[in-house]
Amino acid sequence: MTANLWHVRILLAAIAFVATAPALAQQKAFADVGKQPDITVLIGSTPWYPAFEKVVGLYEQQTGNHVKLDVTPFGNILEKARNAVRTGQSPYDLMTLDTQWTIEFYEGGFVSPLADVDPAFAMPKEVFHYGDSGYWNAQKRWRTADGGKLMAYTVLGNVQLLYYRDDVLKQAGLAVPKTWSDVLASCTKLAKPPSSYGFVARGEKGNGIRYDWQSVMLAEGVQVVKDPEAGDFTVTINSPQAKKALDLYVDLLKRCGPPNYGSLGQGDVIQLLATGKAALGDVVTAAFASFEDPNKSAVVGKLQTAPLPAGAGGAHGAVIGNWNAVIPKNASDAQKKAALAFSRWFLTFGAQRAFAEAGGIPNRSDVYTSDLAKNPKYRWMPAYLETQKFARQELGYAEGAQVEQILGLRLNQALIGEMSSGKALNTAGQEIEALFKKNGRRTGVLPPLPE
Amino acid sequence: MLLNRSFRYWSLLPALLLFAALTLYPLLNLVRMSVSTVAFANGAETWTFTPLRNFAALLEDDVVRPAVVNTLVFVGVSVAIEMFLGTALAIAVAGLSRAKRLVRTVAILPILVPPVAIGSMWKLMYNYDFGIFNQAFVALGAMPVNWLGSTSVALWSVIAVDVWHWVPFVFLILFAAVEGISPDLFEAAHVDGATRRQTLRFVVLPLLRPAIVVAFLFRAILAFKVFDEVFLLTAGGPGTSTELVNLHLYKVFFEQNRLGYGAVLSLAVIAAIVAFLLVSRRVALAVASQK
């Protein structure tokens, strides 16, 4: 009788375990952060903001803690962040900053290393490093985990992908382009302006052309500066390979894009793909969700993604454009801890999966190998995961914003025909060298290209 | 009597102190910043006295020259067109016998729209593939125009938006002035046998002169300060074709975080506007004293 009772007990326990296992697994997928004070987060009104807002809602629901979101247009975030850290006490406990801006905040000593807030804090090993943009090595003045302190984590890691219309390529008997030269060959055949364009990417002056062109530049093995991490700021932007990359990019936009290629911004590129006017495009991963929204897109289910094509030597290049979350140094200790508690929760598998389901780009590798990746709704995931292998940070030094302005203007001038590509790169090279020289960097520039 | 006068001077002191705090201090700080290099380290700012560095940057900056030329073209052309259209509209509407109030209300609507909304709205209308202008051109069998992507057209597209935005402002000032002219003067001109054209030339326009000067000064100063529309429409491109001084100043100050050089550019803009005001004041006095 006693033995029978034991059997029944074991059976009941097994049934109870099977019944509660999914719930337990779900609980483990999120961090238990306990009761925390309310926090305020500075965040941009970006295309991925709705996904972040949903995940924050989930955090509030699970923990009972409150998060106030200060949603700010892109153009004002930097000023709000600067004002916050330069006053007595920051009105924000967590600030999301574009990767390019983080250097100013790290170098200026305006943000708290995460280990200073909680020495036990460690970044989960599944979280992507995004070119070490969250680390700061003050001695080297460089973002690297090698000797650097962890200052931030990536909330959203954007990289460019090649978007293509599978149906259009098949109809034309073309394969998915593997190299940038393939893109040029295919898009020339597909372009039937003004009704449709073969390829679209940003040509507008400033960040747009600088960012998009640099993927082609990196694929050709070109660097703007020789070895900034080692302190060698010799400018190498006016190399023959860089000229080749620029000539190719100009060709791509002029021969395959719309006539307003010189002012084409991200909104225009997304619009041309979403309306079905463009067959191929170089766009950020974050745009994918809008292409699948029937209210915003005429090509739902028709756009596929691939890693950006390779250069002539077979190497790939992509620039990381991530948003990093930092904790201001002048927030109170209690608020810093509450911000880090939210961060710990946000970096869990459960939160990142929820972020992906809401239309965001998760920062953990295990989400990309989960069942989500098999769902056609997330068919961008394999291309994104592949891109992580070669994507890198660019202009990661204090002069980055000025170098971007220089490149953004000179590349645009080459594109619209105000300058030859050789002259544009020579001019940019000289200007960047002068800038480094003025700041006391070890610098130089390659001999000028024929103009 | 002496005490009374003394009290009057002392009573100005609070206002003077407020003026000094709100205007002079920021201006002096700007001057100090213009001769300094401002850097940030360990969460604090450091100012280093480098008197020539920022002024040398002004001479080396390749973008300043096209920005100044574009700004002068922008101010000259947009204000001239706005003054002409605003004056013509004011006179035409004042001559209406019916629906005058309705026309006035409708005409001033563009001033009420925020510049950010104007920039976004016109950017959509100028869109090469989907914009209303090019859709209309194509429907009429004409070629679409590259409104914002062509270096020879972009600045004029921006000027057109500014004209649309600010003609109502000139109209409003001059309409009030036209309405203020005594009907007796029109009657006297009519009795003297003046034609409508002669009445306009010898009665209306001379009487509108002070209002025209005021409208011109306001518009010119505001045109010098234009930013939002250009920023949203073209961000200064393509190339440097729509780069204006204020836009460049914004990029230097806020995007590049070069506070010292940004201060130099700010002082240059302030100096240009003050010089313009001084010259304009002399011209305005001369115009006003004409009989």
Image: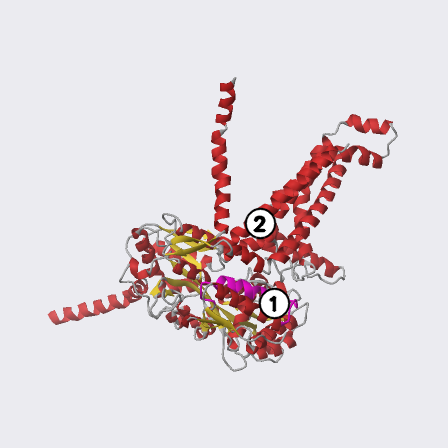
Please name the residue that numbered disc 2 is placed on. B268
Residue range of the region highlighted in magenta in the rendering: A395-420
Camera-nearest residue between A368 and A116? A116
Q: Can residue A353 be seen at all in this image of the molecule?
A: yes
How would you rate the neighbour count of disc 1 (Cα within 10 Å): few for under 14, some for 14-19, many for 20 or more? many
x and y percent of residue A120 in the render? 26, 62
Q: Main secondary structure of the magenta part?
A: helix
Please name the residue that numbered disc 1 is placed on. A276
Q: Residue flagged by tag 1: what amino acid is it?
A: Gly
x and y percent of residue A355 in the render? 41, 62
Q: Secondary structure at mark 2?
A: helix
Q: Can residue B102 be seen at all in this image of the molecule?
A: no
Q: Residue flagged by tag 2: what amino acid is it?
A: Ala
A99 is within the stretch colored magenta: no
How would you rate the neighbour count of disc 2 (Cα within 10 Å): few for under 14, some for 14-19, many for 20 or more? some
Q: Are marks 2 and 1 in contact (CB under 8 Å)?
A: no
Image quadrant in which the C terminus of chain A is located: bottom right
Q: Residue at x 49, y 37 (%)?
A: B20
Question: From this viewpoint, which residue is outermost toward the left?
Answer: A2
- In the displayed structure, A342 sits above or below B109; it is below
Q: Secondary structure at mark 1?
A: loop
The picture quadrant where one finds residue A194 is bottom right
Q: Residue at x 51, y 44 (%)?
A: B27
The Cα atoms of the two marked residues, 2 and 1, are separated by: 48 Å
